Structure formats: C-alpha cells, structure tokens
Image (cartoon, rainbow, N blue to C red):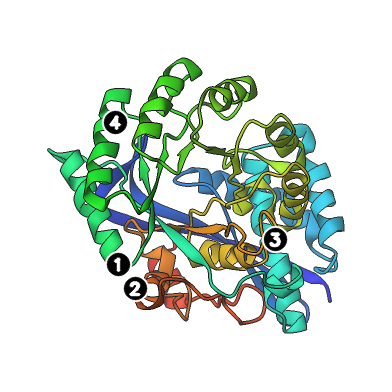
Amino acid sequence: MKITDVKTMILQAPLEQELGFSQAYFGTRTSLIVQVSTDEGISGVGESFGAGNVAYANQAIIERVLKPIVVGHDPFAVEVLWHKMYNGIRDHGQKGMPLQSISGVDVALWDIIGKTTGQPLYRLLGGKFREQIVPYAYGMLFRRVPDLEADFAREAEGLVKKGFRALKMKIGMTPADDVRLVKAVREAIGPEVRLMADANHAYTPQVAIPLGRRLEELGLYWFEEPIAPEDYEGYIEVKSALDIPIAGGECEYTRWGFRELISRRCVDIVQAELLGLGGVTEFRKVLALATTWGIPIIPHVWGSSVAVALSLHVVAALPDYPGALIPVQPLLELDTTPNPLREQVAKEPLCVEAQVARQGFVSVPEGPGLGVELDHDTIRRYQVA
C-alpha cells in the first residue's frame, strides 16, 4: 500500500452570535479536515488544530510541504513518516502551525491503519481501559450581552439539566469580573457539580496567584492556563503558591516541549491537544513522559466530529491513574457551544450530548480507525477552501 494523495478542506460555519475568550471574539467555527488516499482505495481522515485564518496557513503547509514528503510511502510507517515530516520542517518551526499540520496528516494515517486492519483506533493503541467515557461540558464563553453573569448561570443550569456533572467556563476578563462570573455559576449549579475555569493565559503570575486563591474558595476543580504557555518558571510559581490543580498544555508541542512542562512539574494536569502537538504518533511519547512523571493527561478537544471521535478513542485507551481499586478516571472535553461542524461532519453523528442525557456517559466508536465517515453534503455546504 502506498500513499497517493493528500487533500485538505477548510470548513467554516458562521455563528448567529459572536463567542469570546480572553484573547478575542470570533464569529465563525472553522475546521481543517485532512484526507490521505492510498493506491488500494482506502482513505484516512484527520484534522488539524487551528481556528480562523490559521487554517489557511496550515492548509498551505500540508499541501505544499508535507504532501510531497509522504506521497509514495507506506501509510503504516507512521514513525518513519512522522520523522520525515518533522525533519523536513524543523528548521522552520518546532512548534505551532507546522506541528498542527503534521498532526492532521498523522491522524489520517492512523485512520488508514484502522480501516485496513478492521480495527478501531483504541485497539491499535493497546485496548480500552474503560467502556464508559464521562465528558465535561465546555461552555460559558463570553458573549456581548448586558448581563454576562446571568447568561453564564442560565447556560450552566441548562447543562446540568442535560446530565453533565462537570462543567468548564471561560474567565480572563479581569480578576474582579472573573470572581463574579464564577460565583454566579457556582450558585447556579451547587457545590456537587465539578467546575473548572479556563483563563486562556490572560494573566501574569502576580495576578493569577491571588485570583487562584479566590477560585479555591469557590471550590474549583482546576484552574486552566492561568499564564502564558512559554512561562515555565511562572507556571512553577503559580502551582507552588496554590492548592487548586493547575492545568495546561494545549499550546505545547512535541515530546520536547512537553518534556519542559512535565519534568519541571509546571502543571498538575496535562491537556495535550492531539490535533496540534504532533498527532497520535507523538502523543504516545507525551503520554509516556506524563506517566513516567506521575502527571495525569486529560486531552484538550476543540474541533469537528473528527476531533471528538479521536479523543473518545484516546481517552478510552488512557491507563488508569493512579492504579487502584477505584482509580481516578480521565474526562472527555466536550465543547457544547454552537458549532454545526461538531456533529454534522460525520455521516453518522456521534450524538454525544444525547448519550449524556440518556445514560450519563459516552460510548467509544466501534468502527475501524476513528469510526468516522465524512458527510459530503456537509462538506459541500461549509467548505470555503
């Protein structure tokens, strides 16, 4: 079997209302889908992390730089091809968009392997540690509304009514605004529902530490990306000053980047983004690092049906941490904000929210590879490049 082609599709779905986080507001949802074809008629699907216009840059990297490297090679040779791609661009970037681009191609290769062998991805990764995946609902993004506290509270209450027992909200406006928002959500959902807050690296350590103390008082489960991802020493300072678990890593890339984050114990929870750090092949190295240093991984997830399906397989295959009679279970991050690409890209929708409402957990796709076939009507509707 040989790779014959690599194609990309940028999908964009306009939103009725802008959503925001600490860095920007956005009015469209974007996904860059990658399709790798072979001479035996089997194609694999992947996705590259990167919102908005970043998708256009990643598309150019994949089609102009990575495609010539992998065409003609065996798609099963994931290690060989990963190193060929990385060595081909390392002089021009060991982080960021080059690695996001590699990730999309790599995920598609694993999908090909699964489809060729008739095996779901979780089995290729060593099997399922769990049959049931418990998701946390990622909602409460900023909106341009008169009363954001009331808006957040209503949304949080609605998510709990849908069956979610863990929620994540945005912060990163000002410390005073953040505390008011968290208080509003906590009062709406009560003390038993796990609540996490994501600042998207809005603060310096000098601001994040006193804010973190207020979040501790409100019983938050973790404080995500309090400071800039490059500031390893700052992460150590924040983590050392607070009891609340510190989560981060969605903006980190490759085993070499995660070596710094993990070995220096910058975070309590590693949020590896598979569609950004280098794909499934590189994630296995990051997982080995994290387990070696005794730090749990809860993958970051932001994308289409492809991203959600990939994460279901990966979370199912994560080892128990710690090994115990009743081990701590990893969670699936599930973006619940408006995004037609999250369900409609797949020919058979994953129906994650419906599963949560019905049974409180999500099942892992059992089809070969990722278990996702693209819905070409949806592709035609939303494709912009």
Coordinates of residue 43 in the picture (x, y in percent):
68, 75
Does 112 sit above or below residue 384?
below
Most extreme residue toward the front, as rendered? Answer: 325
Q: Name the residue beneath numbered marker 1.
A: 162
- Mark 3, secondary structure of its residue: loop
Q: Is residue 163 left or right of residue 375?
A: left
Does 214 sit above or below residue 367?
above
Q: Reading the chain from its start, which is encountered first: label 1 or label 3?
A: 1
- Residue at x-position 35% and y-position 51%: 28
Q: Name the residue beneath numbered marker 3.
A: 319
- Residue at x-position 38% and y-position 25%: 211
Please tell me in which quadrant of the rendered image residue 214 appears. top left
Q: Reading the chain from its start, which is encountered first: label 1 or label 2?
A: 1
- Mark 2, secondary structure of its residue: helix
> CA gap, disc 2 to disc 4?
30 Å
Coordinates of residue 109 in the picture (x, y in percent):
73, 66
Callout 1 touching callout 2 (CB < 8 Å): yes
Q: Amino acid at mark 3?
A: Pro
Q: Name the residue beneath numbered marker 4.
A: 179
Q: Name the residue beneath numbered marker 2.
A: 357
Comparing 190 with 223, the one in front is 190
Q: Amino acid at mark 1?
A: Lys
